[in-house]
Amino acid sequence: MTTVDPITTRETAPATGAPAPSGPSATARRYLMCRPSHFAVDYVINPWMDPTSPVDAGLAVAQWERLREIYLDLGHTVEEIDPLPGLPDMVFAANGGTVVDGIALAVQFRDPQRADEAPAYRAWFERAGFEVHDPKHVNEGEGDILLAGDLLLAGTGFRTAHAAHAQLQEVFGRPVITLQLVDPRYYHLDTALCVLDERTVAYLPEAFSPGSRAALRRLFPDAILARPADAEVFGLNAVSDGRYVVLPVQADGLAAQLRERGYEPIGVDLSELRKAGGGPKCCTLTLREREASK
């Protein structure tokens, strides 16, 4: 898969008065991101991290800026939280919280190396006017909590505690589906599953327990089943607006599967950030406002 220039993508959109394209449709989103100004790999809290491997911090920033540009070119809004020194993983904004219906559930990290990120994100949600709830158990935000239609898909097994799933239902008032992760390489749900739209997901079956695989088959019979080679380059750590799917450029097999279903894949190279176990979705927290009818 070659990287798609977002300007080209924008120019292919129909002119005013032209019929809308068939197939999946895009919805404008509001995202929160954190510039990797202090990015480094100084410790090991997942299988992808190796402090002995060189990291190009400048390249990490440039790759992140490209991701941000793609979102803006697609018509999305990007908010930014200030990066803090000594928190090299703060760039992975998806772990900073879960925001649904104008309500933000703050996070509690499993690892002490990331603990100081939690109050920074919580303070940002308060300043932005969200109703904020404090966590009762370890939960790592949208890393393990993904909204699919009316359902909250909730991962557990490595980071977010299973006990946190009950709080999700109480805070957001939505049904919660527990999904057990079994492969330590896919330690967060968003590394093994991507929500493409309200009815469709893509996921790696091997990353889940037998019972969770069975549940996913029932819930999403038309899901895209990713290949291990694409998951290993964080292809499922993708961001979809319902039509355009921003994913690592290295996941060319998954990109082809998406095209077959009518989605428009946009490749981005986040190879430096992947050295810390992150991809496009890890860098992107969706800020969902309360619906007007509520």
Image (tube, rainbow, N blue to C red):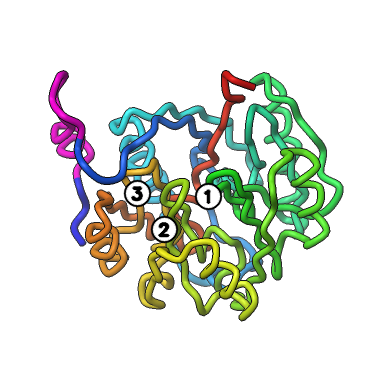
What is the crowding at mark 3: few (fewer than 14 residues within 10 Å), some, or many (at least 20)? many
Does 97 sit left or right of 110 as displayed?
A: left
> Which dot marks residue 25?
none
Q: From what the image shows, is residue 29 above or below residue 244?
A: above
Judge by depth and name the residue closer to the eye, 244 or 41.
244
First-in-chain label (1 vs 2): 1
Q: Which residue is mark 3?
A: 246
First-in-chain label (1 vs 3): 1
Q: CA distance from mark 1 to mark 2?
A: 9 Å
What is the crowding at mark 1: few (fewer than 14 residues within 10 Å), some, or many (at least 20)? many
Magenta span dominant secondary structure: loop
Q: Position of residue 233 (x, y in %)?
A: 39, 68
Query: In the image, what residue occupies the spot 43% across and 73% down?
Result: 232
Q: Position of residue 170 (x, y in %)?
A: 80, 42
Residue type of the residue flagged with mark 1: Phe
Query: In the image, what residue occupies the spot 34% across and 49% down?
Result: 245
Q: Secondary structure at mark 3?
A: strand
Q: Is residue 170 magenta?
A: no
Q: Which residue is mark 1?
A: 39
Q: From what the image shows, is residue 131 above or below residue 45?
A: above
In contact (CB < 8 Å): disc 1 and disc 3: no
Residue type of the residue flagged with mark 3: Val
Q: From what the image shows, is residue 198 above or below residue 207?
A: above
Q: Secondary structure at mark 1?
A: loop
Q: Which residue is mark 2?
A: 272
Asked if one can make out residue 276 in the rendered structure from this viewpoint, the answer is no
Mark 1 or mark 3, whichever is nearer to me: 3
In contact (CB < 8 Å): disc 1 and disc 2: yes
Does 92 sit left or right of 119 as displayed?
A: left
The stretch in magenta equals 5-20
Judge by depth and name the residue closer to the eye, 144 or 22.
22
